[in-house]
Every structure is written in C-alpha cells, then in structure tokens.
Image (cartoon, rainbow, N blue to C red):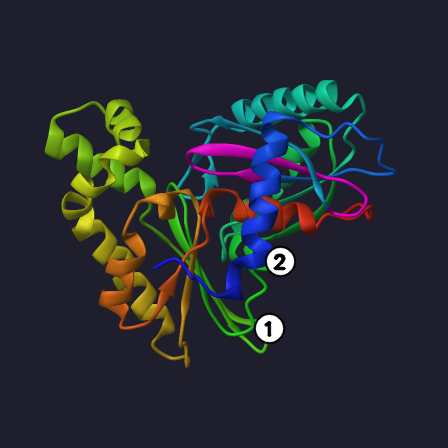
Amino acid sequence: MEALNSTFLYCDQLVRDFEKVIKTPIVNKSAVYYTGIDLGTAYIVLAVLDENYQPVAGAYRFASVVKDGMVVDYIGAIRIVRELKQELEQKLGTELIYAAAALPPGTFTLDSGAIKHVVQGAGFEITNLLDEPTAANAVLKIKDGAIVDIGGGTTGIAILKDGKVIHVADEPTGGTHFSLVIAGAYKLSFDEADQYKRDFKNHRELTPVLRPVIEKVSSIINRHVADYQVKEIYLVGGTCCLEGIEDIIAKQTNLPTYKPQNPMFVTPLGIALNCTQEIL
C-alpha cells in the first residue's frame, strides 16, 4: 500500500520536483552542482542538485550495461554517462564536476573500482560511493525498518535501527526476472516483454503472472529480516512501480509494506544528496 500519512511527504515532493526539472531544467546559477549517478540494470539515471540540494536537472536512458548489479559493459557505461552529462551541461550552461554513485549492498569489494572508473571516465570527480538502500534513505528518512531496493537485476535490503544501518544484503531477482516470466507466458521477445511490463495499463493483468517472482522477492526479504525486529518494509527501485507489488509482499512477509508515489527516482536523488566537494 502507498503510505498516505506523512512518511513520504519529503520524498514525494522531492521526486515531483525532480520529474519537473527532467522536462524543464532550472538554469539559475548555482555556486556548485551535485550529481547523483545511478547505474541500474535497466536505466542509467543522472540527478543534478544545486548548492541547496534542490533538483535542477535530470536525465535517464535505458541501458543494459549492468547485469545483476555488476558492470558488464564498462565502455558502454562510460559512453552513456558521458553523453547524459554533456546533455545536462548543455541545458544548464555549466560544467558538472562532482558526482556520487552507489552499488548494490555487499558488492563493494567486487565492483566499487569499476563504478568509480565509470564515473571518472565520464569526466566527473567522484566524491562518494555508497550502497543503494542507504542512499535511498537520504530521501526516505526512515529511522526503523527495512528499505528494499528492487532493481532490474537484484533485490537490495538495508535494515535500519534508530537511523543506523545494521544489516545489508543483495541477491539476484529483480525486474529482469519479471520480464523473462512475461516473455515466457506471452511468447514475446525479452525486449517486447520489458516494454509490456512498463505500461501501467497492463499491471493488473500481469500481477497474477508475476506473483511467483514477487513471492521469491518476498522470501529473500523474509530471510534477511528474520533475525531483526523489523516492523515495516519500504520499497524503492524501478521494479516497485508495478501496481500491487507492495500488497503481495505485505501478505508474504506479514509486515506493513509501503512505497512512495514514484519509487524509480528515490535512489538517484539519495545518491545526489550524498554528493560533496571532497574527492574520493
């Protein structure tokens, strides 16, 4: 269920502001610009904030340079980030210098170097690298509970207690798996299935088809929250845009499950909020 109380007031307003500046950037001069780069399995998103950490521009592009949370097309990733950077610099009339990025939790030793080099290769000075659910919490501002980031390839979990992250995990299963199930059920190509999934008009019809995969995601969540006193789950990530996904997860986990109005842009905005001028 979408939280109708004050939980997502800041989050939903920030995302609405970001959606506006994707279409119409704010070109007022700022002393500094902070960029958040989200290298997702399905999309690469750049979110630009001004000196007051307010959204001023953004861009995103469908990409397949990341698989299961790992960069598999290093050159392609650099090219897309560089092109998005140049596009936003043109619109803003300024150079974008500082950027932060994020990785699925638990992958720092495996992939942090690759992510850092992608950001630097695209022409940014990298200032921060953090895990995706922690980044998302800069926008959500959750004190206690589990933040579950269901991306294209993986499900990342961060459990918080008194505002501190006490457990992180990341496991394969995400939007890619949803698309594979749709492709099989409807005899579509993967790309056709992926497009079919993104059309909100199809969501109600797809929910029963995708229920087994959502239940798999729920079992991942159950396994990781079992040893902690988690009372609520908060969903982010593009895959969470699927209508009704929160209701199935709530039923399978026996925990109230909430998502903001647009879960897709929460993590990139959280990454940008963690950007500074101190180079890594």
Q: Are the two marked residues, 1 and 2, in contact with CB atoms closer than 8 angstroms? A: no
Question: Mark on residue 5?
Answer: none
110 on left or right of 271:
left
Question: Mark on residue 138?
Answer: 2
7 on left or right of 55:
left
Screen quadrant of the N terminus:
bottom left
Q: CA distance from mark 1 to mark 2?
A: 10 Å
Q: Quadrant of residue 203?
A: top left
- The magenta span reads 37-53
Element at label 1: loop
Element at label 2: helix
259 on left or right of 122:
left
CA neighbours of label 1 inside 10 A, class few (<14), some (14 to 19), many (20+): few
Residue beneath the point at 34% across and 69% down: 256
Q: Nearer the viewer, residue 223 or 209?
A: 209
Compared with 225, 98 (above or below) is: above
Q: Is residue 42 magenta?
A: yes
Compared with 77, 264 (above or below) is: below
Q: Quadrant of residue 64?
A: top left
Kind of residue at disc 2: Ala
Image coordinates of residue 264 in percent, x first then y, are 47, 43
Image coordinates of residue 117 in percent, x first then y, are 65, 35
Q: Which residue is mark 1?
A: 163
Residue beneath the point at 53% across and 52% down: 132
